[in-house]
Image (spheres, rainbow, N blue to C red):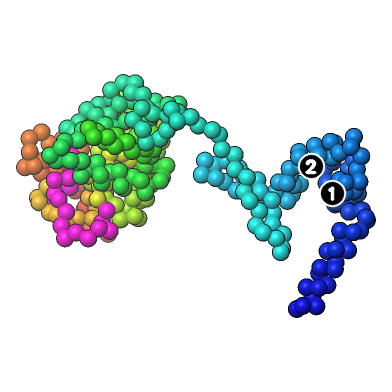
Amino acid sequence: MEEEVGNNEEEVQGWKKSSEKICVTKMSTRNCQGMDSVIKHLDTIPEDKKVRVQRTQSTFDPFEKPTNQVKRVHSENNACINFKTSSAGKESPKVRRHSSPSSPTSPKFGKADSYEKLEKLGEGSYATVYKGKSKVNGKLVALKVIRLQEEEGTPFTAIREASLLKGLKHANIVLLHDIIHTKETLTLVFEYVHTDLCQYMDKHPGGLHPDNVKLFLFQLLRGLSYIHQRYILHRDLKPQNLLISDTGELKLADFGLARAKSVPSHTYSNEVVTLWYRPPDVLLGSTEYSTCLDMWGVGCIFVEMIQGVAAFPGMKDIQDQLERIFLAKRRRLSSPRASTSKCESCQK
């Protein structure tokens, strides 16, 4: 080891004393014409030429590489970042990030003053929905402002909706952009969709076109399949909670009554789903149900899209709703077409 150290010191001293030229390979200088350039030590370069050399060195970009040797990665804001490929025996290259300076007063996500309320869209028992505009990116949004009470705190439906939607990313699920929490309100910022299925059917009375029925039903089932595969029940399917964009895209919304079946629970509440779209077993008080709860609502919405009116429009209470369901069943069984098909199946 001592001999190797001594040899290295002799080599370094010999290199310092040497006046040989140093070869720099492929530097992007003005004198480079595709061949290797030879540059002397700065001490041996005349003063009138030192400035040009120093400028060349200061403007040299260490990240500059041919396009076939540049890799692209994506940052959080989806901007491309170029970095130099690492070679063997060298340290990994540093990533060059381009960050735009932002003033402390510029609007940011998560702030109440980052959104401007344009008009009131609707009001419920514990929340009000506004059409708004983001001051960050200028896009339209839907602001669901939930009123908080000191005694009761944040409604559990709002907590459940926010926690579930944060993990759901699908074309047929409404997108949650931001959450703003203050002392008085909790605001959920959603993507803005200009209408829902209920308003759409009101504009087209007498039933929708069969092609549109198939289009909406397919998207509804695809969105339900997505959440059911993640063990989530919507539990409040109705036309008002199915948003329709101007391009015909359907999105499931209002997850206030949704429930994750992955969370252990012996029983569920039977006070779920709007009365018209609630299945008979839940109307009778059952608290043990699964995805069939949502599928009953899909069937009711399917019939409503075809004929233009609700399938079982109960007007009074649960008893009236059950009578309408069973009355429709008796009518279906007693119809001549049903009895004929039944006889033909018996003969076969």
Identify the residue at horizontal 29%, vertical 52% (top origin).
232
Depth check: give the residue in front, 335 or 62. 62
Mark nearer the N terminus (2 vs 1): 1
Tell me if mark 1 has few (under 14), some (14-19) or many (20+) residues whose alpha carbon lies within 10 angstroms of its own: few
Depth check: give the residue in front, 322 or 144. 144
Q: Which residue is tagged 1?
A: 26
Q: Which residues are magenta?
A: 260-282
Q: What amino acid type should be assigned to the residue bearing mark 2?
A: Gln
For residue 57, the mark is: 2
Residue farthest along the top direction in this orientation: 119
Q: What amino acid type should be assigned to the residue bearing mark 1?
A: Lys
Depth check: give the residue in front, 275 or 136. 136
Identify the residue at horizontal 17%, vertical 47% (top origin).
279
| Residue 277 included in the magenta stretch of the image | yes
The answer to whether one can see residue 240 in this image is: no
Majority secondary structure of magenta residues: loop
Give the percent coordinates (x, y) of residue 148.
20, 35
To which quarter of the image does residue 133 belong? top left
Give the percent coordinates (x, y) of residue 7.
83, 72
The answer to whether one can see residue 189 in this image is: yes
Identify the residue at horizontal 30%, vertical 47% (top origin).
163
| Residue 330 included in the magenta stretch of the image | no
Give the percent coordinates (x, y) of residue 275.
15, 40
Identify the residue at horizontal 85%, vertical 68% (top origin).
10
Give the percent coordinates (x, y) of residue 220.
34, 43
The quadrant of the rendering that contains the N terminus is: bottom right
The quadrant of the rendering that contains the C terminus is: bottom left
Numbered disc 2: secondary structure:
helix
For residue 78, the mark is: none
Depth check: give the residue in front, 135 or 300. 135
Q: CA distance from mark 2 to mark 1?
A: 13 Å
Please state which of the two labelled residues, at mark 2 or mark 1, is closer to the viewer.
2
